[in-house]
Image (tube, grey):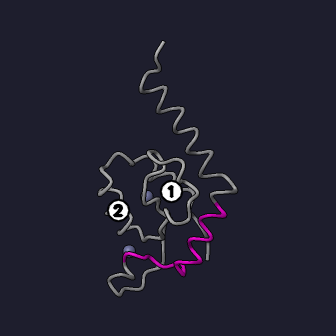
């Protein structure tokens, strides 16, 4: 019997949670953050200094799981720039958004 959308979504969510809690993701995220000096790269492009809030997947994890741990596919962004980046991708990443935020909480 073919899997329903709900089943597939559930399986995807489980995988995403596992991924965002993984040691490998933590490591990649930190490499990216260090390279980006913990600053929002989009703000920086506009000559603004803003501390990052999330590490974002340029090519979404959902569509490109093989790039999930590719440091070059990651970018440090503030909440405001991240919101814009996600809506550019097409609004299908609402849930992944939540994981990114939860996975990124950090105390300086
Ligand atoms: Zn920004
Ligand atoms: Zn994102």
Residue 20 picture location, percent across and down: 59, 52
Determine which residue is flagged by label 2. Answer: 85
State the residue at coordinates (56%, 78%): 35
Membership of 36 in magenta stretch: yes
Q: Quadrant of residue 43?
A: bottom left
For the residue labelled by badge 1, is the local secondary structure a helix, a strand or a loop? Answer: helix
Q: Quadrant of ligand 2?
A: bottom left
Q: Residues within 10 Å of mark 1 (few under 14, many from 20)?
A: some
Determine which residue is flagged by label 1. Answer: 100
For the residue labelled by badge 2, is the local secondary structure a helix, a strand or a loop? Answer: helix
Task: Specify start and end residues of the magenta stretch as a single range.
Answer: 26-42
The residue carrying mark 1 has its beta carbon less than 8 Å from ligand 2 = yes
Q: Earlier in the sequence, mark 1 or mark 2?
A: 2
Residue most extreme to the right: 23
State the residue at coordinates (67%, 57%): 24
Does 75 appear above or below 11? below
Residue 79 picture location, percent across and down: 40, 67
State the residue at coordinates (35%, 87%): 47
State the residue at coordinates (57%, 57%): 103
> In the picture provided, is 67 more to the left or to the right than 94?
right
The residue carrying mark 2 has its beta carbon less than 8 Å from ligand 2 = yes
């Amino acid at each position: 019997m073919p899997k329903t959308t709900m089943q597939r979504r559930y399986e995807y969510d489980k995988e995403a949670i596992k991924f965002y809690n993984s040691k490998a993701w933590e490591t990649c995220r930190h490499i990216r953050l260090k390279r980006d000096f913990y600053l929002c790269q989009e703000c920086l492009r506009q000559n603004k200094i803003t501390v990052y809030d999330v590490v974002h997947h340029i090519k979404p994890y959902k569509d490109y799981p093989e790039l999930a741990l590719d440091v070059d596919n990651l970018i440090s962004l503030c909440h405001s720039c991240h919101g814009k980046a996600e809506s550019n991708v097409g609004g299908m990443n609402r849930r992944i958004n939540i994981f990114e935020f939860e996975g990124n909480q950090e105390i300086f």
